[in-house]
Structure formats: structure tokens, C-alpha cells
């Protein structure tokens, strides 16, 4: 056989072998990716299946805002401690899948009311009216809403220490915050306790008025919560 024919035959064999090898490699990779995708899907489904839904039990829960006094005025510069009387929400979580948990919390803005005994009842009425009409403008912004987007969790001696990231909507402004909390599970309920702070100026919340001027506080607001949720 002539030399040029031998070279042509060798080239054809090389091309054929390479094509078959590439095809086998691609098929193997496809099978591997498919297996990975199926594994991820199974893990995600398992997480969803183990998570349970809980509804916040407002009667057994507390949600409080502390506003630090910003000046000596008619109310003698006392801090304000405001308790939410009307709030609700849902939690999706499980002890073996806390990192995939989610939280939605709603607070009726006009349900926040002064609780401190240092104020008389007539003073509390004035404070609450100013909170609704001037500070929070509850007719225009009736709801305070937090919706989680991510959860970081660390387990210490049976206690879940979490950092819940999410979007807080207050006074018509939405900003991302991170809420640290300690979570425990017991029977058909869970309990979450913690504190977090925000700057009211970030949410364009005023703290005084030239006409009223009775609720004058610093920029930092401290939120404290002790929430019990029952499985549904």
C-alpha cells in the first residue's frame, strides 16, 4: 500500500478513536451532573419535608421597642418602652433543618403603645396619639413587616443560635437587617428570644414635632422579642 494511503488510514483511526473517547467522556460527565442534580434535589426535598409550619402565638409572646430619651421635655426625659399589642406571623423550621428556616412577622403599627409606669394614663394617651399621628404615621403606614431571606445557625448544647437576615419594612422604607436569636424546640412549639437595634433615621422615622414635641428620642431603637410559635 502506498505511503499516502497509510497516512490517510491512520488519520481516520485517530479521529474516530478521539470522537468515541470524547463522546464517552461527555456521557460520563452528563451522568455525573445528573446524579449531582438528583442528589441536590433529594436533599432539598428532604429539607422541605422535615420542616414544619408554626404560627406565632401572640398571647404567649412579647415584642417590645425601647426608645431612649433624647432630651428633658414635658415627660422629664424618660425612655419610652412600647409594646406591640397586635402582631402575627409564621415560621417554617425543624430541628434538623434550621438553616433552611423562614420567618414572616407582621406588626400593626398602631398597636404599639407606651407601657412604662412612670407615665400617668393621660400622659400615655398623649404619647400614643403622637406615636400614631406624627412618629409612625400609622394611617399611611399601617404595618411593620419583617420577611427573612437567609439563616445562619450554630448549635451549642442543644440551643440553636441563629442570625436571621431579611428585609424590614417600617414607615414605608425597606432595609436589610440581621436579627440574632436563640431558638429552642419543644413538643409542638418553638421559642425564639433575642434583641436587635436599628437607627430610626434609616427608616425616615421622626421623633419630635415643633408643635407637639412630647416624643423626643435618640436615633437608636432597641427591639426585644420573646416569641412562642405553635405547630399547625
Image: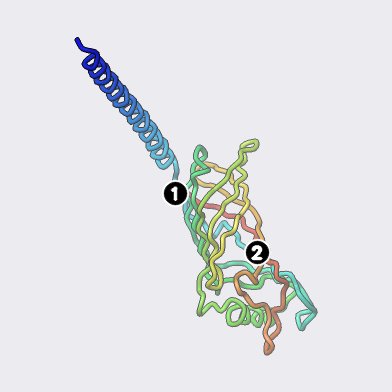
Asked which secondary structure carries label 2, the reply is: strand
Residue assigned mark 2:
198
Return the x and y of residue 61 as percentages of the image width and height.
Answer: 58, 57
Q: Is residue 210 above or below residue 86?
A: below
Q: Which coloring applies here? A: rainbow
Q: Residues within 10 Å of mark 2 (few under 14, many from 20)?
A: some
| Residue 136, numbered circle | none
Q: Is residue 166 above or below residue 213?
A: above
Asked which secondary structure carries label 1, the reply is: strand
Indicate the quadrant containing the N terminus: top left, top right, bottom left or bottom right: top left
Return the x and y of residue 48 as percentages of the image width and height.
Answer: 41, 42
Q: Is residue 214 above or below residue 176?
A: below
Return the x and y of residue 63 as percentages of the image width and height.
Answer: 60, 62
Q: Quadrant of residue 195?
A: bottom right
Residue assigned mark 1:
53
Return the x and y of residue 27 as percentages of the image width and height.
Answer: 30, 27
Amino acid at each position: 500500500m502506498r505511503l499516502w494511503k497509510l497516512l490517510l488510514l491512520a488519520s481516520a483511526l485517530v479521529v474516530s478513536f478521539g470522537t468515541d473517547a470524547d463522546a464517552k467522556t461527555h456521557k460520563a460527565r452528563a451522568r455525573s451532573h445528573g446524579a449531582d442534580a438528583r442528589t441536590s434535589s433529594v436533599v432539598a426535598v428532604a429539607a422541605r419535608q422535615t420542616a414544619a409550619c408554626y404560627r406565632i402565638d401572640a398571647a404567649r409572646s412579647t415584642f417590645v421597642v425601647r426608645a431612649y430619651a433624647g432630651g428633658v421635655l414635658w415627660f422629664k426625659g424618660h425612655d419610652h418602652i412600647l409594646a406591640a399589642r397586635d402582631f402575627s406571623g409564621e415560621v417554617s423550621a425543624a430541628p434538623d433543618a434550621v438553616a433552611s428556616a423562614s420567618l414572616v412577622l407582621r406588626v400593626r403599627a398602631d398597636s404599639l403603645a407606651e407601657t412604662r409606669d412612670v407615665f400617668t394614663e393621660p400622659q400615655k394617651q398623649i404619647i400614643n396619639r403622637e406615636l400614631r399621628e406624627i412618629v409612625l404615621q400609622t394611617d399611611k403606614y399601617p404595618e411593620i413587616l419583617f420577611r427573612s431571606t437567609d439563616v445562619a445557625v450554630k448549635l451549642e448544647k442543644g440551643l440553636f443560635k441563629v442570625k436571621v437576615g431579611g428585609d424590614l419594612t417600617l414607615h414605608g422604607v425597606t432595609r436589610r437587617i440581621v436579627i440574632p436569636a436563640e431558638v429552642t424546640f419543644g413538643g409542638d412549639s418553638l421559642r425564639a428570644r433575642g434583641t436587635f437595634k436599628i437607627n430610626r433615621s434609616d427608616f425616615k422615622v421622626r421623633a419630635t414635632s415643633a408643635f407637639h414635641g412630647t416624643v423626643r428620642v435618640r436615633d437608636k431603637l432597641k427591639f426585644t422579642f420573646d416569641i412562642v410559635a405553635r405547630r399547625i
